[in-house]
């Protein structure tokens, strides 16, 4: 459930972020209008894409923390918690099996 909520939120965020094509289109428009020299285009595009990627990463971290906090408050176990519990059960089962032999 946690992963589904997180993926849904991130999909919505992804739709709101700028794609490479959109960044290039905006920079091309600025070049066409004469606001920036054409020789600066590659650097400006790369700088903007770097900022977009960093903002996406930061936003993803914030969403993940918020979802974890919300789910933790509801008392719903996370996948990591269930995985840890399953590992513990497996270890205990092996110990019990050894004791029975």
Image: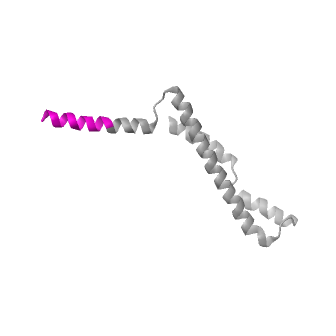
Q: Nearer the viewer, residue 62 or 33?
A: 62
Q: Residue sitting at 33 percent across and 39 percent down?
A: 87
Position of residue 60 relative to residue 97, above or below, is below
Percent from the top left, x then y, of residue 93? 24, 35
Percent from the top left, x then y, of residue 91? 27, 38
Percent from the top left, x then y, of residue 1? 50, 34
Q: Residue sitting at 65 percent across and 44 percent down?
A: 13
Q: In this rendering, would 92 be left or right of 98?
A: right
Magenta stretch mostly in which secondary structure? helix
Percent from the top left, x then y, of residue 62? 61, 42
Q: Nearer the viewer, residue 35 or 75?
A: 75
- Most extreme residue toward the bottom is 39
> Is residue 19 shown to the viewer in this render?
no
- Most extreme residue toward the left is 101
- Most extreme residue toward the top is 74
Q: Residue sitting at 39 percent across and 39 percent down?
A: 83
Q: Residue sitting at 61 percent across and 44 percent down?
A: 11
Q: Is 7 covered by the magenta stretch? A: no
> Is residue 38 shown to the viewer in this render?
yes
Q: Which of 16 and 58 is in front in this view?
A: 58
Residue extent of the magenta highlight: 88-101
Picture mark count: 0
Q: In this rendering, would 75 be left or right of 43?
A: left
**Quadrant the C terminus occupies:** top left
Q: In which quarter of the image is residue 67?
A: top right
Position of residue 82 relative to residue 17, above or below, is above
């Amino acid at each position: 459930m946690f992963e589904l909520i997180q993926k849904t939120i991130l999909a919505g965020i992804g739709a709101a972020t700028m794609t490479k094509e959109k960044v290039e289109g905006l920079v091309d428009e600025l070049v066409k209008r004469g606001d920036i020299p054409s020789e600066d285009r590659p650097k400006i595009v790369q700088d903007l894409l770097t900022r977009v990627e960093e903002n996406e990463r930061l936003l993803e971290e914030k969403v993940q923390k918020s979802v974890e906090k919300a789910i933790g408050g509801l008392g719903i176990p996370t996948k990591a918690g269930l995985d840890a519990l399953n590992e513990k059960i497996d270890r205990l089962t092996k110990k019990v099996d050894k004791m029975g032999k």
